[in-house]
Amino acid sequence: MNVREAIKKTNGRFTSVTFIRSTNTKSGKQGEVVTRTFRTGVKKDVTGAGLRFNPEDKGLITLWCKDGYRMIKESNVVRIKCGDIDCSYFEVTT
């Protein structure tokens, strides 16, 4: 099962996603392995204007966490865990 299929199967439930950070931010450095809790299907703060690009074309997945919407590169996802769904995509050695 690929990353998009696994995210779709969560049906909006809280999901733990482990990924490799692709950019430097205030909360971490590029290349750092991060685990956060996300949800899909959240309509909060949606204005209806939409995005100016298609995230799928750039290999991005849009997820919601307590800090707002986040986009994660599909290729950087290491693990997805939600209930009986537990998918690992590659091992990370630190």
Image (cartoon, grey):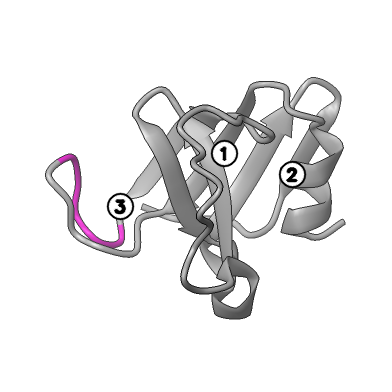
Going from the N terminus, do you reach mark 2 or mark 3 first?
A: 2
The secondary structure type at the circle numbered 3 is loop
Q: Nearer the viewer, mark 2 or mark 1?
A: 2
Amino acid residing under circle 3: Glu
Is residue 29 inside the magenta stretch?
Answer: yes
**Residue 63 or 80: which is nearer the viewer?**
63
Q: CA distance from mark 2 to mark 3?
A: 22 Å
Image: magenta residue range: 27-31
Q: Earlier in the sequence, mark 2 or mark 1?
A: 2
> Dot 1: few (<14), some (14–19), or many (≥20) neighbours within 10 Å?
many
Q: Position of residue 14 (x, y in %)?
A: 64, 21
Q: Which residue is mark 1?
A: 17
Name which quarter of the figure residue 87 lies in.
Answer: top right
Q: Amino acid at mark 2?
A: Ile
Q: Position of residue 9 (x, y in %)?
A: 86, 38
Q: Disc 1 and disc 3: Cα gap in Å?
A: 14 Å
Residue 74: give x, y in percent of width and height: 59, 63
Tag 1 secondary structure: strand
Q: Is residue 67 above or below residue 3?
A: above
Nearest the viewer among 94 and 66 is 66
Q: Amino acid at mark 1?
A: Val
The quarter of the displayed image where residue 90 is located: bottom right
Q: Which residue is mark 2?
A: 7
Is 25 a magenta residue? no
Q: Which mark is residue 32?
A: 3
Report helix, strand or loop for mark 2: helix
Q: Residue furthest bottom?
A: 57
